[in-house]
Amino acid sequence: MLVAKLRQLALVTRAGRVTLPYPFQPHPPAEGFRGLPTVDGEKCIACGACAAACPARLISVRPEGERMVLQADYTRCTYCARCQDVCPTGACHMTGRFETAIADRSKLRVRVALQAATCPRCGKRFASQRQLQRAAEQAGEPESSQALLALCPDCRRRAYGARLKGALGHG
Ligand code: SF4
Ligand code: SF4
């Protein structure tokens, strides 16, 4: 019995210290750790992909006056990282932050407001100017197609249909 206890004591002593001095010293999270997400307002194009992918429905992208506004309330976040996975610009990303117990909930909310683009036909605000600019750069299409890109989805569909009819001789 005594020998067994001595063996146990030797085992525990040999292990050294196994607890961390956190919170007295910072504890950096492991690589790939999924902490609180955030949005880089300089990279965001307000495309809404993160809002569509978020299972907690805590992100919205809507027109507000002359702006397209992204709002996120991370108090309900489940840290699934789907927003990060679908973001086409890398604006939405998981940080290493895990200390989210705070008194002021507004500190866990994010708002990004971008200049909205207006459809030249119907006047609807449907996207951010930054998103349209990116689409135009990526498409690298001729001028006629660039003009289609500037239209809201409804007007674009109608304009494309009219163009197709003309090309088929049904105009
Ligand atoms: S997916 Fe990325 S670029 Fe699109 S609205 Fe979300 S954060 Fe912005
Ligand atoms: S990590 Fe998941 S729950 Fe949190 S904002 Fe992103 S998609 Fe939504």
Image: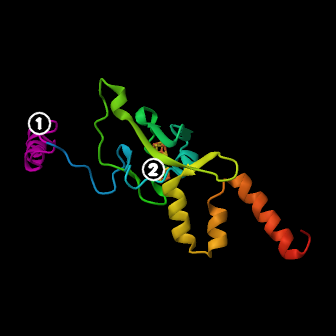
- Mark 2 neighbour density, 10 Å: few (under 14) some (14–19) many (20 or more): some
Q: Is residue 82 above or below residue 74?
A: below
- In magenta, the rendered stretch is 1-25
**In the image, what residue occupies the spot 38% across and 45% down?**
37
Q: Using the rendered view, name the quadrant where residue 139 is placed.
A: bottom right
Residue found at the very far right of the displayed protein: 170
Q: Is residue 47 above or below residue 5?
A: below
Label 2: which secondary element: loop
Q: Report the number of numbered marks.
A: 2
**In the image, what residue occupies the spot 19% across and 45% down?**
27
Under mark 1, the amino acid is Phe
Q: Is residue 145 above or below residue 99?
A: below
For this rendering, which residue is in front, 116 or 76?
116
Residue found at the very far top of the displayed protein: 103
For this rendering, which residue is in front, 41 or 53?
41
Q: Position of residue 30 (x, y in %)?
A: 27, 53
- Looking at marks 2 and 1 on the same chain, the residue that comes earlier in the sequence is marked by 1
Residue named by callout 1: 24
Q: Position of residue 40 (x, y in %)?
A: 37, 50
**In the image, what residue occupies the spot 39% across and 52% down?**
93
For this rendering, which residue is in front, 85 or 152?
152
- Mark 1 neighbour density, 10 Å: few (under 14) some (14–19) many (20 or more): few
Is the CB of the residue bearing disc 1 within 8 angstroms of ligand 2? no
Residue named by callout 2: 81
In this picture, residue 78 sits left or right of residue 11 = right
Mark 2 → mark 1, Cα distance in angstroms: 29 Å
Is the CB of the residue bearing disc 2 within 8 angstroms of ligand 2? yes
Q: Position of residue 38 (x, y in %)?
A: 38, 45
In this picture, residue 20 sits left or right of residue 82 = left
Q: Position of residue 131 (x, y in %)?
A: 52, 57
